[in-house]
Image (cartoon, rainbow, N blue to C red):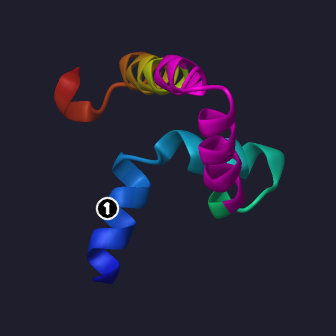
C-alpha cells in the first residue's frame, strides 16, 4: 500500500508536493487547500494546476538538455 501511495504522490500530485516544498508547507495541506479552492470556485484552479504541471515538465526537460549524461554526448 505504501508503494502505491508514494507513486501517486510522485506522479499525480507532483505539483502540490513541489509547491509545498517551496513554501515550507506539508504537501497534504497544499492538496487540501487546492481541493477546497476547486470546489469553491467551481473548478478553475484545475487550469492553474495543469499549467504548473506543464511548466514543471518543461523545467525538467530543460535541465536534462543543459546537463546531458555521458551516454547522451
Q: Residue furthest left?
A: 71
Q: Residue at x 48, y 45 (%)?
A: 14
Residue 18 coordinates in the image, percent (x, y): 61, 44
**Location of residue 19 with respect to 26 vertically, above or below:** above
Query: Quick one: which residue is furthest to the right in this view?
Result: 24
Quarter of the image for the C terminus: give it. top left
Residue 60 among those drawn in magenta: no
Residue 34 pos. (x, y %): 64, 42
Is residue 51 rendered to the left or right of residue 8?
Answer: right
Q: Is residue 6 left or right of residue 34?
A: left
Above-or-below relation of 46 to 6: above
**16 with respect to 12 (left or right):** right
Please state the horizontal and vertical placement of residue 53, each as a whole percent of the image. Answer: 47, 27
Numbered range of the magenta stretch: 29-51
Residue 68 on image: x %, y % = 33, 25
Front residue of 54 and 68: 54
Considering the numbered disc 1 on the image, is that residue within a helix, a strand or a loop?
helix
Residue under the point 30% across and 33% down: 69
* Dominant secondary structure, magenta: helix
Quarter of the image that includes the N terminus:
bottom left
Instruction: Using the rendered image of the protein, determine whether residue 28 is visible from the camera's viewpoint.
Output: yes
Does the magenta portion include 34?
yes
Question: In percent of the image, x 82 and y 54: which residue is there?
Answer: 24
Q: Which residue is mark 1?
A: 7
Nearer to me, 40 or 63: 40
Amino acid at each position: 500500500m505504501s508503494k502505491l501511495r508514494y507513486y501517486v504522490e510522485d506522479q499525480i500530485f507532483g505539483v502540490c508536493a513541489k509547491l509545498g516544498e517551496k513554501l515550507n508547507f506539508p504537501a497534504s495541506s497544499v492538496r487540501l487547500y487546492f481541493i477546497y479552492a476547486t470546489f469553491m470556485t467551481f473548478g478553475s484552479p484545475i487550469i492553474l494546476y495543469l499549467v504548473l504541471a506543464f511548466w514543471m515538465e518543461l523545467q525538467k526537460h530543460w535541465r536534462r538538455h543543459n546537463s546531458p549524461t555521458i551516454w547522451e554526448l
